[in-house]
Image: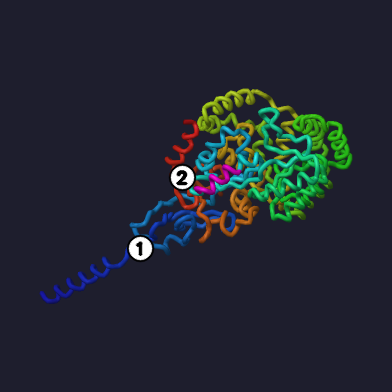
Amino acid sequence: MKSKQLSNYGIISLLVIMVSCQPSGRIYEGAVCIHNIHTIDAESGLLKNQTVIVKGEKILKIAPSQELKLAPENTIIDGQGKFLIPGLWDAHVHFAYIEELAPVMFNLFLGYGITSVRDTGGKIDFVKKWKSKAEADPTAAPRVKIAGPLMDGKPNVYDGSIPTRPELSEGFATVEAAVKRVDELAALGVDLIKAYEMLSPEQFKAITKRARELNLNVTGHIPLSMDAITASKGFNSIEHLRNLEMSMTANPTILLAQRRKLLEEGKNEAGGDLRARLHDAQRYAAIELIDTVQRDKVIQALLENDTWQVPTLTLASGAKNKHFTKSVYQSSFNYLPEKISKQWKEGAAIAAGVIATPSRAAYADWVVEISSILHKAKVEFMAGTDCPIYFLTPGLSLHTELEMMSKAGMSPTEVLKAATLNPARYFDMEEELGLIKEGYIADLLILDANPLENISNTQKINTVIKSGKSYDRATLDAMLRKGSE
């Protein structure tokens, strides 16, 4: 009887020793392990209970959590009940619009989960400085893509003449000068070209032809001297839906002739004044005269030419919706440098008391309506804001834009695509950015709530991961506050 008990004891002891010698889970040295999180991207949708291993700047491994046992020695982020999405893009920003604000924009973007931006116009030396700074330390700044100056005709709009028209553009009197500048900008390292509203048709066609030869995308505003169908052939994307409505009426040829006449008559005016006069003469009237047959011809051209849209709906509807009156915006103004914060608070208070004219209110509704129509027709979109124009706080304003895109009929997955995968595709980066996949750059957001249930949940940011570096909520809040110090 005694010998049998000793035998059992020996077997049990051996089993204990064997179990204690087994590894408790795999160790990923120098990695961050996001455990048991729900992942969401534009291709795979929602995948529940995943473990994502980030090492260096890349996603090393993704597997269902029940299949990937982690040793406690790992650096582990508990993802229980949380959601992982790719880092967001703001595809329309201006570092040079308020130069004094630019030094804090990196922190504002990252603090609100924006890990990449596309700067769509500013003096080349100024915007290139921010691109170079971001490239020097990609874990501490959003990825920055730049267009350099707006390429405009004569007279040019953003000529630095008044504070609301800072020197963002260069005006060209000839085709030759414009093409030469495209070559110079390409040599200086721009990522795209932006064509603007006062260009002649000849200048526009030459600019877009040369950009295509240099493998540079062209974005911008439809020149006032052109119709949307013709201009679409040269554009990879159009900002703000700008001047589309003028080509969607039953009489676009008559309107175009009127614009060209006004352009010739006003060639000695300030560019901004002349542009405003043409917009006032045709924009609001055009949306009351939309012809569905002609509208569909324009949409077909956008589809055939693969011309994407960056509608900046928050900006376009700002006079009516007054985003800047919301408490979240009022609070965000405290993150700005003291002088700018004071100006924005005072300016927003004044703007809040201005009732949108019927024409402006109608235009605010139309931009949402036409975005919905374009989306249903399968025109592609990117999410952008035009910050920091019109009290659009860098970073925060992108989340408002996502809400507006949802109001235009896009599903949460489609909205996320416009703010993640599509900008990556635009810059031929879709094989390394914009999705949650092994080998992709680890630009990621951990959210406390599901954005597929409500796109506003993109604002519930728990952690930002930029090129593999993690920033928890406390660190992000400190980054935001730093701008006002």
Magenta residues span 128-137
Q: Residue at x 51, y 57 (%)?
A: 47
Residue type at mark 1? Gly
342 on left or right of 148: left
Dominant SS of magenta comes to helix
The answer to which of 214 and 299 lies nearer the viewer is 214
213 on left or right of 55: right
Q: Residue at x 73, y 31 (%)?
A: 360
Residue type at mark 2? Asn
The image quadrant that residue 358 belongs to is top right
Number of residues whose C-alpha sits closer than 10 Å to that of mark 2, classed few (under 14), some (14–19) or many (20 or more)? some
Q: Which corner quadrant holds the N terminus?
A: bottom left
Q: Position of residue 170 (x, y in %)?
A: 72, 39
The disc placed on residue 462 is: 2
The answer to which of 135 and 4 lies nearer the viewer is 135
182 on left or right of 423: right
The residue pinned by badge 1 equals 25
Q: Position of residue 300 (x, y in %)?
A: 79, 52
Number of residues whose C-alpha sits closer than 10 Å to that of mark 1, classed few (under 14), some (14–19) or many (20 or more)? few
Q: Position of residue 186 (x, y in %)?
A: 67, 50
Q: Residue at x 54, y 46 (%)?
A: 134
| Residue 398 appears in the rendering | yes
Whether residue 111 is in magenta: the answer is no
The answer to which of 191 and 417 lies nearer the viewer is 191
